[in-house]
Amino acid sequence: MPDIEIYTQDWCPYCVRAKRLLDDKGVAYREIVAPGGTAEREEARARSGRSTVPQIFIDGQHIGGCDDLMALDRAGKLDPLLQAA
């Protein structure tokens, strides 16, 4: 299984959608709670170049946010990333 990290915020509906998709795919991921103003949020910003959550990484590769994750899934490109070892 690939190493999946997702930076989130508790009240974020996009975070919920992204986690739900990953849950539906049956993959394990590490959730990093990163509310604004925290070191975790700054880490997410430094790694992704983006200030919003969620920010998703698969095996260290920045996938993007929720919309990016959903687009990968619709294009049939997410499952191969999730099956990579």
Image (cartoon, helix red, strand yellow):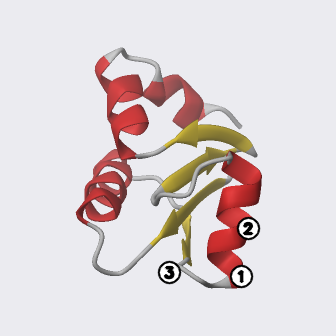
Whole-percent x, y for residue 65 in the image: 45, 45
Establish if 44 lies above or below 4: below
Which callout, 3 or 2, points at the residue further toward the start of the chain? 3
Q: Secondary structure at mark 3?
A: loop
> In this orientation, does residue 54 appear?
yes
Label 2 sits on residue: 43
Side (left or right) of 39 relative to 72: right
Q: Are marks 3 and 2 in contact (CB under 8 Å)?
A: no
Q: In terms of depth relative to the viewer, which is nearer, 80 or 62?
A: 62
Gap in Å between the C-alphas at discs 3 and 2?
11 Å
Q: In terms of depth relative to the viewer, which is nearer, 4 or 42?
A: 42
Q: Are marks 1 and 3 in contact (CB under 8 Å)?
A: no
Gap in Å between the C-alphas at discs 1 and 2?
6 Å
Side (left or right) of 20 relative to 30: left
Q: Which mark is residue 35?
A: 3
Q: Secondary structure at mark 1?
A: helix
Q: Which mark is residue 39?
A: 1
Task: Identify residue type, mark 3.
Answer: Pro
